[in-house]
Amino acid sequence: MNDYFTKSRWFDRLLTSIQYVIPQQGLSRLVFKITRLALGPLTYWFIRGFIKLYQVDMNSAQFPEVSHYTTFNQFFTRALKPTVRPLSKQAEIISPVDGEISQIGHIERGQLLQAKNHFFQLEDLLATQADIVTRFKAGLFCTLYLSPRDYHRVHMPVTGQLTDMVYVPGRLFSVNQRTSRVVPNLFARNERVICLFTTAVGPMALILVGALLVGSIETVWAGVITPNYLSQVQRWHYPTTSAPVLSQGTELGRFNMGSTVILLFNANQISWLSEIRVTHKLLMGQSLARCLP
């Protein structure tokens, strides 16, 4: 058994090692451009191949016909039928995405669990924004991975008012289970957009983490945030008088190609549902957490 795990880790490192040397940003920007080209029959052929390869459920799409999508990005960020993702009425906090629970739990000693025996620092994840770090240093976290077959729009887990958005430049490693096991500080190294909200259950951070071939990340209030050609952290503050208030289940943003969402909450306000476990698959709108009395 030990030989098996040793070989498995070696294989994971081998497959991941190429990501250290390839031009991650350049490839992702190329994908950004290609996926927005209207190539007619070639676009339709590629979409059909993608649907078959990843077994994408088009029955839930608002427009199930491939011919509706003039570019691959339109297909990848497709809307769903309004009836296929009803919001749970039994929990106060819902899943913001269709995705798999990669990790979930408490932030302990300022650390989040990335994979078994692998941790990363909250301070690094939040780009040393001290005021935000203080709010969540003893909080809860949930990491949700979106596979290529998933719906790639991100929605509000609970009603909240936007206060800040932070863009953090970084690498663009893949964010699947393999890279989570072998790339140190993966989510604190990748490019990301941190969205901070005030809610009825205290502060909430929703972090959209970029990944290899993720053409861009965008939000409903600011449009496309990445790719960003600057190499510095940028922060926007939204005054209470003009900041948008987004209701639970409202679209917040989207990934143009797949990636990961990390949620942060105050541990004194909510509790993750006991049945939610690592590798648990959730659909947007399903129950994720409850409020504490």
Image (cartoon, grey):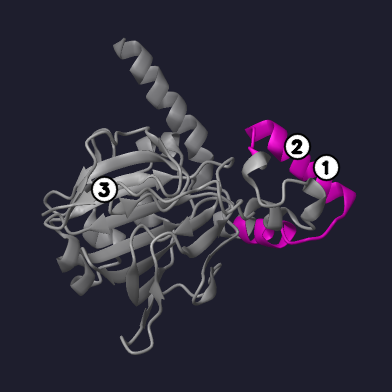
Look at the picture and state if 274 lies above or below 70.
Answer: above
- Label 2 sits on a secondary structure element that is helix
- Label 3 sits on a secondary structure element that is strand
Location of the N terminus by quadrant is: top left
Is 52 on the left-hand or right-hand side of 99? right
Labels 2, 3: front one: 3
Residue position for label 1: 45
Q: Where is residue 38 drawn, in percent x and y?
A: 82, 60
- Mark toward the start of the polypeptide (2 vs 3): 2
Is 106 on the left-hand or right-hand side of 39? left
Q: Amino acid at mark 2?
A: Gly
Q: Where is residue 140 drawn, in percent x and y?
A: 20, 52
User: Residue at the spot x=38%, y=26% of the render?
Assistant: 9
Location of the C terminus by quadrant is: bottom left
- Mark toward the start of the polypeptide (1 vs 3): 1
Q: Which residues are magenta?
A: 28-57
User: Residue at the spot x=52%, y=44% of the render?
Assistant: 19
Q: Amino acid at mark 1?
A: Trp
Between the residue at mark 2 and the residue at mark 3, the CA separation in whole angstroms equals 37 Å
On residue 49, the disc is: 2
**Label 2: how many Cα within 10 Å (few below 14, some 14–19, many 20+):** few
Q: Where is residue 266 drawn, in percent x and y?
A: 17, 59
Q: Main secondary structure of the magenta part?
A: helix
Residue position for label 3: 289
Q: Are marks 2 and 1 in contact (CB under 8 Å)?
A: yes
Is residue 233 at all visible to an observer of this figure?
no
Could you say which quadrant of the image residue 202 lies in?
bottom left
